[in-house]
């Protein structure tokens, strides 16, 4: 049927600027935890009947003490990922004929989660190029229009995964609360990178992604829940009082949760250094603009995920030997990975956690590629 | 907030007879894959937009070619675990006022999945001690009783996780098909241990557990789907044609799927050796009986998961120094782990994959514990 496949990862050792991946690179502590807890159901050695109640390893303290404090929520759980958290919330809140309001920059998983939960979708519009901005007042317009209908949840992608735009979440939450609609922040690109506390922003729920932004091995995520929604979201099984229905009993039951816990102290440290990350991102974006590319989205930029329009590279691609694949190949030659193969005119990248020397190296590579292939 | 926690696993190096864990111990190949693909979203380096379509690493071939052949189904997907597969099926089939039929030995996750999917539950009764048997005709009785109502799915736990009993699945499926009710096999304790092909057994769905029985790092599972249910279960998003709604787009997006793939060739080999595993389990059970314990469930036994009644140990616990914890402590002294702390009268264990010498050692330990503590 099949031979032992070759399972080497060819991109190890490259400078990886893929926004999906920069925040998920394991810490040394997580690498150790991965090896220590790699076997199947390893975390269940001393399970008293509920994942969150396991004290050895210290899942109990992480879930009940550290995580709610970190997320700024009353309660928290570890999930199989941000999308699984979004779905759990939507599914618990779902009603016949209900709908959700999503920002127009929402990640595809918010759409899919709503579809799976049987909810209609209304979109808060996005402004045109170059900002692709979400105006918080857009939530008011949509909620006003939907008044009388059952809007069960609003979602704000914070920041979004295309442009790295950060919307004024406080304004959004205060508008949503006027309409009695709970707000969920999708923090897949913020929780674990930048300071974000759901309570301070007025959000009722927040999700984060372990593999995207918390230096954990995937798939794993976090979910913060405010007190008023505790009982609904975490209701217990009639057949087994230990088990929370919406989480199917236990979620990240393996090495994934252990890498999340192992990296957590370092994640706290790096979140405190967020200011430097924003500075680096801004500097990098301005240097890219000097080379002829145009940064889209918030300006000055407030996040490491940066979207560029690159007419100069697009022009080159028209007569380059490898056509639209030239950029990928040229970067690959220089040991840089993370811009999707075939893209030239528009692409995104992340500067997160990269030393300035590496970013300088990437900039020099773009400079060289432009001047030698043009 | 928190210090770097100590995340050592104290049970490494023991003889582990926990049924949850015997089938999930990583192969050397999976250990390598874990390290190679540990970082966050590592499998997404060359993603064309859908997890199953990734060719590098070879997820595509595994999901579209190897897995359906292995499970004996038309289609297959990798999930975040067996329970997530059960829920996906129940959720896709769910109807207002609908219900499911579960065997009375069903795992708690089948109950929780049904509750989450809003489905009522009817149970096929279990016979009394010592067999705890499910009679396939029990499905007929329940389906007959429910006739006129909307039974959307029947589930057979194959084998169950308490007694390791294997029910005649062919008989169950033929009864279910008389009533036009699809059948799901919960193969969390069979897929990856013993030969099991959904088609041969007449099942419409099958789920398996990577961390329980396929030598993979958790949480990860597999789901087999027969052709008639393909479109319903794997319907695509209206907003993103690449994404399957019921799977929220992508499921095991990280190291978990890579360990599953890495172990797969060895899993095929070990499944072919199942006969020897059954022999070992029977021999072990008979030796335990010689020491005064009584094996419950199918006899002769057909699986490595074995449930014992141990009145002899229970008697000792009544006046042992450590009370009901004496067995756990005595086994721990002898470097044996896997029987829950505090149990003496009833417990389960697994002989899966253990060399005869280790099993002999475990038997001698029980013998010694009984004779020295009595």
Image (cartoon, coloured by chain):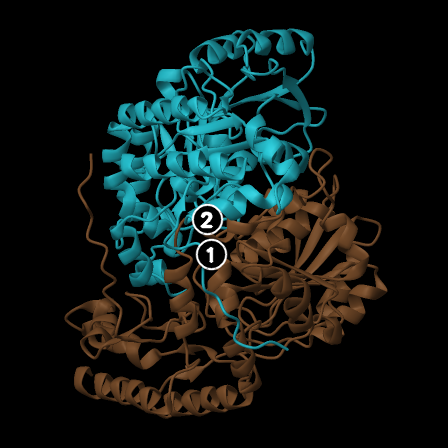
Chain colours: A brown, B cyan
Real-space Cα separation, disc 2 to disc 1, in angstroms: 8 Å
Whole-percent x and y of residue A69?
68, 72
- Residue B312 in the image: state x and y as whole percent: 56, 28
In the picture, measured across the screen, residue B176 lies left or right of residue A246, that is: left
Towards the viewer: B365 or B282: B365
Q: Which of marks 2 and 1 is in front?
A: 1
Query: Residue B319 location in percent, x, y?
Result: 65, 39
Name the one closer to the observer, B292 or A41: B292
Q: Is residue A52 above or below residue A115?
A: below
Residue A148 shown left or right of residue A262 in the figure? right
Mark 2 falls within which chain?
A: B
For numbered disc 2, what is the local secondary structure? loop
Up-down: is A23 above or below B298? Answer: below
Name the quarter where the N terminus of chain A is drawn. top left
Task: Say the numbered circle drawn on residue B251.
Answer: 2
Circle on res. A219: 1
Camera sees residue B80 = no
Residue B310 locus on image (x, y percent): 55, 28
Q: Mark 1 lies on which chain?
A: A
Q: Is residue B307 visible?
A: yes
Q: Depth check: A79 or B17 in front?
A: B17
**Are dots 2 and 1 in contact, CB under 8 Å?**
yes
Which is more toward the observer, A182 or B70? B70
């Amino acid at each position: 049927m099949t031979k032992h496949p070759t399972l080497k990862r060819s991109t190890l050792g490259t400078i990886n600027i893929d926004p999906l991946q920069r925040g998920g690179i394991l810490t040394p502590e997580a690498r150790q935890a991965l090896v220590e807890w790699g076997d199947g159901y390893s975390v269940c050695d001393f399970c008293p009947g509920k994942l969150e109640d396991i004290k050895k390893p210290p899942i109990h303290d992480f879930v009940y003490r550290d995580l709610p404090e970190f997320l700024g929520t009353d309660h928290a759980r570890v999930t199989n990922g941000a999308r699984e958290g979004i779905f759990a919330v939507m599914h618990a809140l779902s009603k016949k004929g209900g709908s959700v309001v999503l920002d127009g920059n929402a990640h595809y998983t918010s759409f899919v989660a709503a579809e799976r939960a049987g909810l209609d979708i209304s979109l808060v519009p996005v402004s045109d190029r170059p900002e692709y901005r979400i105006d918080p007042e857009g939530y008011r317009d949509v909620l006003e229009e939907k008044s009388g209908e059952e809007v069960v949840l609003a979602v704000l992608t914070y920041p979004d995964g295309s442009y790295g735009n950060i919307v004024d979440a406080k304004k959004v939450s205060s508008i949503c609360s006027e309409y009695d609609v709970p707000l969920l922040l999708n923090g897949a690109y913020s929780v674990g990178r930048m300071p974000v506390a759901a309570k301070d922003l007025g959000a009722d729920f927040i999700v984060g992604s372990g593999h995207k932004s918390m230096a954990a091995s995937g798939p794993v995520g976090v979910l913060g829940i405010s007190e008023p929604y505790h009982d609904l979201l975490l209701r217990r099984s009639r057949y087994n009082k230990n088990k929370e229905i919406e989480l199917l009993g236990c979620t990240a039951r393996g090495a994934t949760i252990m890498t999340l816990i192992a990296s957590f102290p370092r994640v706290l440290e790096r979140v405190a250094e967020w200011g430097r990350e924003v500075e680096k991102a801004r500097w990098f974006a301005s240097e890219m603009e000097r080379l002829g590319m145009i940064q889209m989205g918030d300006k000055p930029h407030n996040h490491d995920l940066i979207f560029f329009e690159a007419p100069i590279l697009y022009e080159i691609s028209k007569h380059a030997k490898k056509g639209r694949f030239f950029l990928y190949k040229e970067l690959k030659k220089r040991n840089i990975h993370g811009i999707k193969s075939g893209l030239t005119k528009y692409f995104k990248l992340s500067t997160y956690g990269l030393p300035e020397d590496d970013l300088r190296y990437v900039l020099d590579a773009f400079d060289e590629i432009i001047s030698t292939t043009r």
